[in-house]
Amino acid sequence: TEACRAAPRLSRAPARPRSTMDALLGLQRLSLVQKICSELKNHIGVDDKTLAEFIIELAQENSTLPAFMRALDENGAEFPEDFASTLLHLVQTMAPRKRPAPSAPAASAAASSSSGPTERFSGLAIP
């Protein structure tokens, strides 16, 4: 216990506050990268995070199977069509989608609304 008290404490840099939505998008992205990594390991025996991220980028830039396969071939990845289709489908279904930011008129109208909490949250209002 004496050594624990004497040891200098490492200070961590203050973390940038992140919204819950940003954290969720990050977790979805990590899940997608992990899934692509496991598919690559199962089919070609390579477990490489960088390769998985590159394949995700190619799939996001080329949303159709022929375009995706062409992009893979141009980059030296000659995958069978069924495997390429699986990868493209995974990216299209698992990729995180950012919600559009509220438009300025809608945000300002909501902010300038003079309605009180009772009108805005009528289900929570106590009579």
Image: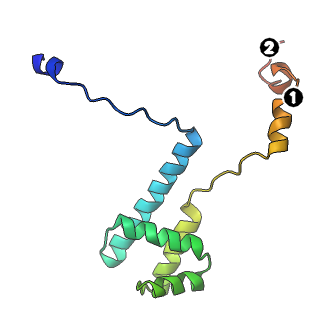
Q: Residue furthest right?
A: 114
Percent of width and height locating residue 24: 54, 46
- Kind of residue at badge 2: Ile
Is residue 54 left or right of 108 when viewed as pictured? left
In depth, the one of 94 and 111 nearer the eye is 111
Sequence order check, earlier mark of 1 and 2: 1
State the residue at coordinates (55%, 45%): 22
Quadrant in the picture for residue 61: bottom right
Percent of width and height locating residue 21: 59, 43
Q: Residues within 10 Å of mark 2 (few under 14, many from 20)?
A: few
SS of the residue under disc 2: loop
> For the residues marked 1 and 2, what is the alpha-carbon distance in whole angstroms?
21 Å
Percent of width and height locating residue 107: 80, 39
Is residue 90 left or right of 100 when viewed as pictured? left
Percent of width and height locating residue 105: 85, 43
SS of the residue under disc 1: loop
Q: Which mark is residue 113?
A: 1
Q: Quadrant of the N terminus?
A: top left
Residue topped by disc 2: 126
Q: Residue furthest left?
A: 2
Quadrant in the picture for residue 10: top left
Q: Residues within 10 Å of mark 1 (few under 14, many from 20)?
A: few
Quadrant in the picture for residue 96: bottom right
125 to 20, vertically: above or below? above
